[in-house]
Each structure stands twice: as structure tokens, then as C-alpha cells.
């Protein structure tokens, strides 16, 4: 347990350091407090969901590796895990829910039949916690997705099935936003693509556009629902062509004023996702970020405080567009303690935003405008050694959550007391 006096003393020293650069640390923490990161429910159970007992992830070009003991098997276990995670994080979070996580109570409900009632217990749970919920259609792990196509399928039965599914998720998400008093982001990602080189890309993309147009025919109040579309470079089984490419969804989002989801694992390893932010915000009102860590390919590793996440946060803060960004996590790692994966990843994302908020942005821009490139570079380098960790520790302290490495022992105890007792 960290000594409160030491934490406060370290913060006082850090505050002095940043004040000398014209940075107000108290104001930075207030802004950090406004960033609500949406926790992805699927990290707790390896994207299994609750449609059927012992559901397994299938199809869709996604894969979870590892078999660490204790993944959530019931709604109650998953909720307990999420609550535990939130108890170890400063600030306020949201929940990101997939359609396969409905409270079906043992009833077989196909995806084109889901209703608000199947998610009302989630809404009631969120009300008690005082959090919002984001929602996603689940267009994978289903027989109608086995051939690799859903909303762009040339099989009209399949395509209509998925259109109806996504329509229903939008209706459910809007009701979530209405009841919880905060808009729900409904993000559409489909796995559609081809393993080998296709001849007819155009028809699939025309069908995807046609499907989306039909899905969005009904408009919901923006204070209840935010519609988002998400691209991907490639996936397992769709290495040669993904129907919903970045260019496809970028064009669709701009034309139809939808949120564009930038998933940090869905681009080429040498692309900088942070660099796309200011470009896209010239043409659309808001963005959705799915933050993960790709390693050589879309491997969805746990987020760490690396250059990529730092650039994303810096671009957002420097452009003063925090109010136009929706942030969610999107990784699934079954090779380590899943609660730990949540906490490490969320804290890393928060650290990145804090690091950006503690930059002397005004001074850096003045140097840039004056052509003082040496001075700009020097200060950017100096910021890397400033005591931003002490500021984050203080943020944890005033939020009454574990400071520094203290959360590790807390998670180990939860594993011993709760997770280890779950049946495999």
C-alpha cells in the first residue's frame, strides 16, 4: 500500500515541474476525468457470448489465443469481472457489449429476433453503476457467416438475415441510450472478404452499400444513438480482399455523416492511425477509436504505453477534439489473467491521454510557427522524462483506487478468491 504523503509530495513536485512549462496539472486531470473509455465485454470470456452453453468463437477472421483458467461463463461472472476491473481504475468507464451477450435465460434466440428485453438486465445493471453502454451487432460465429460474407452476401437469405440483425441492434442501442441518458455507439463491423484473389469485388461492395442504406433508413435521436462503421485491412480467411475496406467506409461515413471507427489493429503495421484523426475530422463530426495493439498483424494484444497510443492521444489533445472522440478498447487475450489484461490496457490508454494533456502545447506550437525546430524537438524530448507518472498516481489516489503496482496484488487476490473457483 502506497504512502499517501509520499504520493502527494511527488505530485507537488511534479506540479511544480509542469507549472514551470505553463502546464496546469489540475486542469489536465479534470480533462482526463472526462475521457470515458468503453471496456469491451469480450475480453472476459474470449468472445464466447451467451447464446448457447460453452459457445466458441468461430469464423469472421478473428481468433483468441491462450487458455488461461477462469474465463467468465455466465452473465453474473462477466458482470462481476467488469465491476472488479472498474474498481481498480480511476475515472469513469463505459461498457461495450456485443449482441451475443444478451440475457437469453436459456431461450434459443436467433440474431434476427433479438429485442430490447434480452438486454434490459444489462441496462438495469448499468443504471446501478451509473455508466453508459455501447453496442455492436455480432456478424460472426454463426452458420450464416460461414462462407465469409454477411451484409455483402450474394445469398439473399443470408444478407436479409444480417440486415435485420443490425437493424435490431440499432433499435436496442437507441433504447440503451435513452434509458441511460448517454448516447450508445452502435458500431458495425462485418468480416466479409475473400481468402484468395476475387474476380468480382464490385458486386460485394455494392451489396454492402445497399445493405447499409437499408439499415440506416430509420433515424434515431442523436442523444440516444451514434452510428459507426468499421473497416479492416485483412483477417484470417480474408487475406486477399476485405469488402469493408478503409476507403469504402471512409467514403460511406463522409457521405452519410456516420462515425468512422479507426481500429488500431486494422491497418498496415507501418500506418500511423493517429495521423488519420485530424484528416477525418475535417469531414465528419465524430470518430470512434478501437484501441488495441497489433503485433505484425491484427493480433489484438493488450494495449501498452507505446508510441502508437501516444501519437493517437497527442493528435486528439493537440487538435483540441476530445469532445469528438469516442474511445473503446478492443483486444482479446486468453493467455493471461483477463482482469489484469483489462486493467493494464485501460491504464495504458489513460496514461497516453494524460501524457498528451501534460504537454506544453501552446509553447510547442509557438516554436513550430516560428520555425524553431530545434527548440520544438528539444522540448518534445524533455517531456519524456517529466514526472507524469506521479500525476497519474495522484489521480488514482484521489479516485480511491490502487496506486502504482498495488493493483497487481488486488487482482491476484481476486483470482485466488473468485476466478480460481470457476469450473473450467
Image: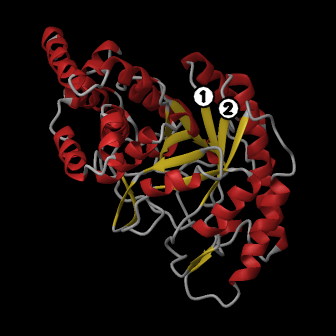
Query: In the rendered image, which quarter is residue 7 located in?
Result: top left
Q: Considering only vertical position in the picture, is 16 above or below 344?
A: above
For residue 131, side relative to residue 226 (left or right): left
* Rendering coords of residue 36 (x, y %): 49, 30
Looking at the picture, the colour scheme in use is secondary structure
Q: Which residue is mark 1?
A: 132
Q: Nearer the viewer, residue 337 or 280?
A: 280
For residue 202, the mark is none
Closest to the observer, 147 or 133: 133
List x then y, in percent, for residue 173.
71, 38
Residue ID at (51%, 70%): 233
Q: Residue at x 32, y 21 (%)?
A: 24
Which quadrant is the C terminus positioned in?
top left
Which element carries disc 1, helix, strand or loop?
loop
Q: Can the viewer see residue 21?
A: yes
Residue that label 2 marks = 183
Q: In the visual, does 198 lie left or right of 39? A: right
Dot 1 alpha-carbon crowd within 10 angstroms: few under 14, some 14 to 19, many 20 or more: many
Up-down relation of residue 132 to residue 294 (above or below):
above
| Left or right of 19 on screen, residue 189 | right
Of the pair 331 and 277, the residue shown nearer to us: 277
Residue 263 to residue 251: above or below: above
Residue with the most extreme bottom position: 199
Distance between the alpha carbons at the discs numbered 1 and 2: 8 Å
Q: Residue furthest top?
A: 5
Above or below 296: residue 240: below
Q: Residues within 10 Å of mark 2 (few under 14, many from 20)?
A: many
Amino acid at each position: 500500500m502506497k504512502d499517501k504523503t509520499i504520493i502527494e509530495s511527488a505530485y507537488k513536485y511534479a506540479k511544480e515541474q509542469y507549472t514551470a512549462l505553463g502546464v496546469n496539472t489540475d486542469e489536465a486531470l479534470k480533462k482526463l476525468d472526462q475521457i470515458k473509455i468503453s471496456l469491451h465485454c469480450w475480453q472476459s470470456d474470449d468472445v464466447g457470448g451467451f447464446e448457447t452453453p460453452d459457445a466458441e468463437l468461430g469464423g469472421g477472421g478473428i481468433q483468441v489465443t491462450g487458455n488461461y483458467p477462469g474465463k467468465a461463463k455466465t452473465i453474473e461472472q462477466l458482470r462481476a469481472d467488469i465491476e472488479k476491473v472498474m474498481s481498480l481504475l480511476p475515472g469513469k468507464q463505459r461498457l461495450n457489449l456485443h449482441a451475443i451477450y444478451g440475457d437469453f435465460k436459456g431461450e434459443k434466440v436467433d440474431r434476427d429476433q433479438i429485442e430490447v428485453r434480452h438486454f434490459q438486465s444489462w441496462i438495469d445493471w448499468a443504471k446501478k453503476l451509473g455508466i453508459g453502454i455501447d453496442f455492436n451487432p455480432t456478424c460472426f460465429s454463426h452458420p450464416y457467416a460461414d462462407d465469409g460474407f454477411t451484409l455483402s452476401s450474394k445469398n439473399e437469405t443470408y444478407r436479409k438475415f444480417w440486415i435485420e440483425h443490425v437493424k435490431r441492434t440499432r433499435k436496442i442501442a437507441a433504447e440503451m441510450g435513452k434509458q441511460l441518458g448517454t448516447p450508445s455507439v452502435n458500431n458495425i463491423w462485418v468480416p466479409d472478404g475473400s481468402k484468395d484473389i476475387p474476380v468480382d469485388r464490385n458486386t460485394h461492395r455494392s451489396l454492402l452499400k445497399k445493405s447499409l442504406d437499408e439499415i440506416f433508413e430509420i433515424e434515431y435521436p442523436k442523444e440516444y444513438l451514434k452510428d459507426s462503421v468499421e473497416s479492416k485491412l485483412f483477417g484470417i480467411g480474408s487475406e486477399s480482399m476485405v469488402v469493408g475496406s478503409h476507403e469504402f467506409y471512409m467514403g460511406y461515413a463522409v457521405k452519410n455523416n456516420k462515425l468512422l471507427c479507426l481500429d488500431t489493429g486494422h491497418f498496415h503495421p507501418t500506418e500511423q492511425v493517429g495521423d488519420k484523426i485530424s484528416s477525418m475530422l475535417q469531414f465528419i463530426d465524430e470518430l470512434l477509436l478501437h484501441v488495441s495493439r497489433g503485433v505484425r498483424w491484427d493480433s489484438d494484444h493488450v494495449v501498452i504505453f507505446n508510441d502508437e497510443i501516444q501519437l493517437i492521444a497527442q493528435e486528439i489533445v493537440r487538435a483540441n477534439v476530445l469532445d469528438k472522440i469516442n474511445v473503446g478498447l478492443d483486444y482479446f487475450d486468453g493467455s493471461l489473467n483477463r482482469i489484469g489484461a483489462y486493467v493494464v490496457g485501460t491504464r495504458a490508454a489513460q496514461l497516453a491521454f494524460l501524457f498528451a494533456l501534460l504537454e506544453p502545447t501552446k509553447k510547442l506550437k509557438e516554436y513550430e510557427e516560428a520555425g524553431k525546430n530545434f527548440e520544438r524537438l528539444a522540448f518534445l524530448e524533455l517531456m519524456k522524462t517529466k514526472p507524469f507518472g506521479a500525476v497519474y498516481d495522484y489521480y488514482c489516489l484521489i479516485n480511491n483506487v490502487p496506486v502504482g503496482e498495488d493493483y497487481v496484488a488486488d487482482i491476484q487476490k481476486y483470482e485466488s478468491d473468485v476466478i480460481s473457483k470457476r469450473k473450467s
